[in-house]
Amino acid sequence: MFLVIIILIISGILGFILINENIIIPGKVKRVKDFMQAGEYEKAFNLSQSLPKKMLSQPEVQYLIYEIHYAQQQYYMALSHLNEILKRQNYTNEITELLVRQKIAALYELMEKPKKALEEYHTIVRLDPENLEANSKIGLKLYQMRNFGAAKDYLKKSFELDNSNPNVNNALADVLYRNKHYEDAVNVINSSLPNQKDNYKAYLLRGKCNLKLKKYEACIKDMNEAAKDPGNAAIVNVIKGLAFYRHKENEKAKEKFAAGLDKFTEDYSEIILDASYAYAELLFAEGRINETVTNLNHIRNSGKVYLDVDTRLMALNNLKKYKKLFPLFKGDLEKAVDNELNSGLATLGYTINKKNIINPKAVFLVLLKNIGTANSFKTILGLDLNLKQTATDLIKKLTVYAEVEGLSSAMFFSFTGLSDDTENYIKALNSIELSLLSLRQLEGIISGEKII
């Protein structure tokens, strides 16, 4: 009889355990899920806490409690339950390490912890190299951090997996552009644009690439599309200005530079510096000295070494000191020679015997001076206003011109001065005497001082 009682008790206990594990506990879990679906998260959480302690440590229940906290925006609590799953490494077919880490990465983003999120995405890529979300997230985060070299491979992988994400496409194209891979950048944009007609940033990027590739008409077409976004108006004008300038359409270039460059007074990017230099060239050609200086100063303020900007600024600032030189730079050089130099040289007893305009900013003058009965002195003055660092080519032409004219001496004036190599070239000449005139000396000629 006693044995029967013992068997009945054991059977009852086992039966309770089986009922509890197979009916009561699953029933509670179902009710937790029902409360969650109904948006009754407090009830869901309270009921979950009545589950047996052993059950609470199971990945399914930990994940369920994570979902409750997540729905209530209790992100730190949600994170603790996901970390508990990682700690125990007790995964299931549904709740894998990959899934848990994806959820953790998303939580770190919501908690504004980008470095932590980035660490998780790196782990996800190690677990699943073809993971689209992780590759795109890593690529975009590195791009935002301006770590363009590291971003490139992740962006490229993401693009290969799916080219429908405009943020990834634009970032990859920009990285390729920065690395001077212009054709590759264009190919990325071309493969994605058919599905992204309103991706105006892509048109802007492709236009910049076409500018570099010297495809100016294509660049302008891209800028017309990019301009459909009003926020692009200023930079579109600048890029169009460069395209027109390099295509020798100077009037259109001036119009676009004037409309766009004044919006970039604190911008020292390559395109803005290129545009400022080109605009300075066009302004100088019109004798607009102050505006020329403003644009060149913007380049100098960037702190970057850019072509001959320092030399040009020094020359222009000197020019501003010598008011009598202004007519030479404002408009017609031939007229300036007739009006200014002619009168100045006449005061010294010289007459201009012959005039040879080499280009709109360079002239050779054959000067004649009577020095006694039936005696005269001929010389040649070469004048270059092109603001070039070296005038070697003009000097060579000057020597030939002097030899043809049978002149006894020649003088050369270059507004910005000559390089050391050019001066050495001058010293090596034996056939005629060349001397370099300074700004002060040229002003002296104009004002009548006897310095020749």
Image: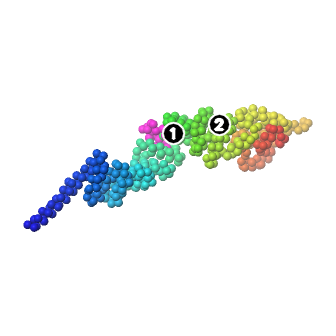
Q: In the image, 76: left or right of 318?
A: left
Badge 2 crowding class, 10 Å Cα cut-off, few under 14, some 14 to 19, many 20 or more, is some
The residue indicated by pointer 2 is 282
Image spot of residue 96 (x, y percent): 33, 54
In the depicted view, which residue is nearer to us: 316 or 30?
Answer: 30
Question: Which residue is depicted at the point 14% across and 61% down?
Answer: 11
Image spot of residue 268 (x, y percent): 59, 45
In the depicted view, which residue is nearer to us: 101 or 219?
Answer: 101
* Range drawn in magenta: 185-201
Comes first in the chain, label 2 or label 1: 1
Image spot of residue 328 (x, y percent): 74, 36
Q: CA distance from mark 2 to mark 1?
A: 25 Å
| 263 over 78 or under it: above or below | above
The residue indicated by pointer 1 is 204
Badge 1 crowding class, 10 Å Cα cut-off, few under 14, some 14 to 19, many 20 or more, is many
| The residue positioned farthest toward the left in the image shown | 1
- Scheme of colours in the image: rainbow
Q: In the image, 358: left or right of 135?
A: right
Question: Which residue is depicted at the point 83% across and 42% down?
Answer: 451
| The residue positioned farthest toward the right in the image shown | 373
